[in-house]
Amino acid sequence: MTDQRDQHWMRYALQLAQRAWQAGEVPVGAVLIHDNNIIGEGWNRPIGEHDPTAHAEIMALRQGGKARQNYRLLNATLYVTLEPCTMCAGAMVHSRIGRLVYGASDQKTGAAGSLLDVLRHPGMNHQVEISSGILGMECAALLSDFFRMRRDQKKTGRSPSF
Ligand SMILES: [Zn+2]
């Protein structure tokens, strides 16, 4: 049951990631769920927003805070297609979400176990439950397709603005 629900919301996050792709951004999507309702959603857009903090997770958490009129997002679950970076993992601790579900692991910058484990650091005052690898293949394929497309564009000289 939980698995089905997790896959459902991860599919939704994958759709949000597509919106990042369409804008020429690295395709990562995130959706924040509370009581089985969407309270926030976001996709990666640091280039378009000229904002190094405009990661999918930050956008979803900001929206969630506004929706609940509270900077604490207790018992919320954040679904994200890619393992969060240190900044986003830190924001999750500040927001006090209950659970993180992510798709693909990120060996280079992942802060939920790959490079670092910010969320389960024993000294952390708030612990976030983590589930990983939900639709992991699809999430990873979306990213590798994107980077392959970008490499091909560079080779053929059809590189747009980035
Ligand atoms: Zn991030």
Image (cartoon, rainbow, N blue to C red):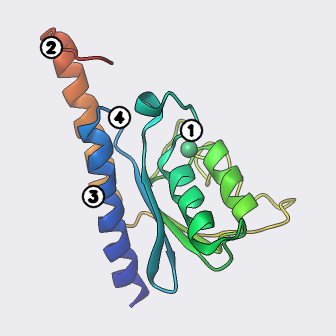
Q: What type is the residue that disc 2 sits on?
A: Arg
Quarter that holds the C terminus: top left
Disc 2 crowd rating (10 Å Cα; few below 14, some 14-19, many 20+) is few
Q: What type is the residue that disc 3 sits on?
A: Gln
Q: In percent of the image, x 62 and y 49: which residue is there?
A: 88
Decide if ligand 1 comes within 8 Å of the CB at mark 1.
Answer: yes
Q: What type is the residue that disc 4 sits on?
A: Glu
SS for callout 4: loop
The CA span between labels 2 and 4 is 16 Å
**Which residue is tagged 3?**
15
SS for callout 1: loop
Q: In percent of the image, x 27 and y 40: which residue is there?
A: 21
Q: In percent of the image, x 44 and y 54: which residue is there?
A: 42
The CA span between labels 3 and 1 is 23 Å
Asked whether the beta carbons under mark 2 and mark 4 sit within 8 Å of each other, the answer is no
Disc 4 crowd rating (10 Å Cα; few below 14, some 14-19, many 20+) is some
